[in-house]
Amino acid sequence: MEELNQSASSAQSNTPKKADESSGMSIPQTRIRAIMRSSPDSLQISQEALFAMSKATEFFIIQVAKGAFDKSDGKSLDYAELASFVQSNEEMEFLHEIIPKKVKASEVWHLLERNT
């Protein structure tokens, strides 16, 4: 957990402050609030709940990016590496459809032709 906290603090110090400078957030809380309000079950969203969800979102993004980067070549992180990490990690199953592996159009056409 300490490593994750260090990653979060180093990620925040390396990114330009533009979202919510006063709260130390790098993700705009207005976006998090909009997503939370889109749920039909949501009632009132307290400032504390919004802060907690924003921080949890930041930590989750850091965890996914760090995990994918650790499995990459160590120089950069691109979509293919991120998708590969998500697809190979059982804990990320809920993201399989959101971050799928890239498939070339020619491969899709070939599969469609073979199945018809």
Image (tube, rainbow, N blue to C red):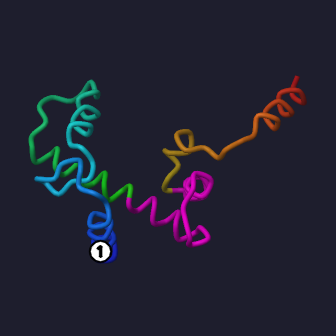
- Picture quadrant of residue 59: bottom left
Chain part drawn in magenta: 62-90
Q: Principal SS element in the magenta part?
A: helix
Decide if residue 109 is on the left or right side of residue 40. Answer: right
Taking the spot 59% from the left edge, 67% from the top edge, the residue there is 72
Picture coordinates of residue 36 (x, y %)? Answer: 25, 34
Residue found at x 28% / y 77%: 2
Residue 43's quadrant in the figure? Answer: top left
Report the quarter where the C terminus lies.
top right
Q: Which residue is drawn at 19% across and 51% down?
A: 52
Task: Classify residue 51 as left or right of residue 4.
Answer: left
Residue at horizontal 16%, vertical 49%?
Answer: 51
Image coordinates of residue 45 in percent, x first then y, are: 13, 36
Instruction: Verify whether residue 23 appears in magenta.
Output: no
Say how many tags the image has. 1
Q: Position of residue 20 (x, y in %)?
A: 18, 49
Q: Does the magenta stretch include residue 85?
A: yes
Name the spot of residue 115 as percent of width and height, x first: 86, 28
- Residue assigned mark 1: 6
Quarter of the image with the N terminus in it: bottom left
Q: What element carries label 1?
A: helix
Horizontally, residue 10 falls left or right of residue 42, namely: right
Q: Is residue 87 above or below residue 43?
A: below
Which is more toward the observer, 27 or 36? 27
